[in-house]
Image: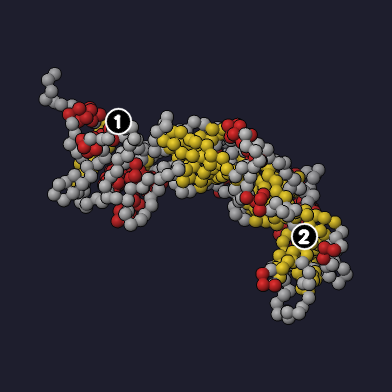
Amino acid sequence: HLALANRPPEASSFSVKLVQQGLRSTSPIHLSLLEAQQFAWRTRIVSSQDSKSFPGPFIVVEISKGIEDGLSIVVSPLLKIHNETDFSLELRFQRPQHEQTESASLILKAGEVIDDAITAFSAIDLSGGSRKALTSLNVGNYIFSFRPNIADGPRSFGNSSIEWSDELKGGKTVCLSGLFNKLSYKVRKAFSVNPTKFSLSSASCAVKSEVGSVTNIYFLIQTVGKPIPIVNPDSSGYAPGNRNPVAMQEQKELFLLPTIQVNLHLVADPHSTMDSDNTWSQATISSGSAVNFYANPATIYFVVTLTFTGSSCKPVNSSDWLRKLQRQKGDISHLDIELDFGGGKYSAMLRLSRGQRGTLQAGIFTSYVLQNDTDAPLFCFSANQKPLSRGDIESFGTDYAGAKDDRKSTSGYCTYVGGNLVTWRSKKQTTVARSSAEAEYRAMAHTTSEILWLKNLLKELGFMYDGPVPMHCDNQAAIHIAINPIFHERTKHIEVDCHFVHEAVMSQEICSPFTPSSEQRADIFTKALGGKPFDVLCNKLGMIDIFAPA
């Protein structure tokens, strides 16, 4: 609460106090507006009901000149804790060299902030060791630990139990070395001219599964601190400013963070792994999105798998990165590592940098993207590859615009149950497709309906199928739309089909792995084939020529 309302311009002072729901407040302190200053003082909390007083928090005030000859007044606590993870965190505070029974716990939801002013008011409603534990935050004499509520996280891990994190004494940190220390980040340079100090540490929590296996979930902790002079107001409540400080206290902000954030800038959706033995370090990332990881920052083991091909890059670990960093002089802003998939068939870049809060940022991208905005398919091949013949081109994909009279496409599919062919279909589409991807996607919508009908039929007969049903498609553009639909002027007219197939993919009813056109069995239902590929597909479909000689 700032007592500044309706004050004349010539007023030279103002007062500050903290108020809690009209029940309690700190005693007001009077400050001068005539000079820029920054200092803190210890308050006492007074009850509005019975006038009882209790130890209160430190309040930090910074008065500085603002724009257009105005004043900027910032009132802040001495300690702030930010939860920038994906979990709700249970925080536990206790005094050093005291039993855990004399501790106090608070819940800090994802994205929320708590400070020592809030805990000072909360401590009044407690008693004994719990009250003393929360009060210790006001002077920095505390032990701090936490544990996440994994049920609130982005991934489910059943009935696993989780232990408390390592204890942090008074917010004291142990600086990280190696990769995290080498890569510079924006905050360090932005605040290099003032006394603000930044440090990074890590803490881990042991996670025990139902079967007894133990893994660890790691968190990054950034501590931002700066010295603040402490003053004692006089008997009238006037603060003399920072001219006569009685002590120096450190104002701190603690940021609880994931250790790594992966940003994807590929058309494909890869599966990223930081540690093959740690469930918390694995995720499938959609194009254009970011996923947080909680891997061990000391030994990072990075593997990227392209889901539409199943090919993985060569594993990259932190020791490889450090060898490259050791050859660099001074801090560097980022480090680029080339990723190779399928023996050079696919490639991407992995860029490592440090985020504003110190989290390791891993960006996966390619140096260029080719987008076909025409109504005709494009066939791309390397410079030393022989161009495709007309016959080879016609063997790819669906029968796009194959009807000479109305240019409608033909779609076809076949379904298997237990390795046996049970249904198949070849049908001319009712509308003209404007691209091969659209023709393929309409066929995917019809096939999805058939798959869901078969699953429900088998369920009624008592046959359960766990997991998504693979629907093999030979058009990568259609697969990308199914996994991550992007609606624009060229796809909005098939938005219903897009939503239908995408919903089936997201609900794990189906999945759509890529199948090369040479192995697409449904091609026999959509186009004319040569004798050899026709015989091969007939054999794969289990067809037998009953008129063939024995």
In the image, which is nearer the foreground, mark 2 or mark 1? 2
Residue at 81 percent across and 43 percent down: it is: 97
- Residue 419 is tagged as 1
Q: Amino acid at mark 2?
A: Pro
Asked if one can make out residue 336 in the rendered structure from this viewpoint, the answer is yes
Which quadrant would the N terminus be assigned to in this image? bottom right
Which quadrant would the C terminus be assigned to in this image? top left
Answer above or below: position of 400 versus 72.
above
**Percent of width and height locating residue 13:** 78, 74
Which of 200/148 is in front? 200
Q: Residue furthest top?
A: 550
Which of 518/114 is in front? 518
Asked if one can make out residue 124 in the rendered structure from this viewpoint, the answer is no
**Percent of width and height locating residue 304:** 48, 36
Q: Amino acid at mark 1?
A: Gly
Number of other residues with Cα within 10 Å of mark 1, as a class: few under 14, some 14 to 19, many 20 or more: few
- Residue 57 is tagged as 2
Dot placed on the residue nearer the N-terminal end, 2 or 1: 2
Q: Seen in the image, is 14 located left or right of residue 482? A: right
Residue at 85 percent across and 63 percent down: it is: 243
Answer above or below: position of 10 versus 389.
below
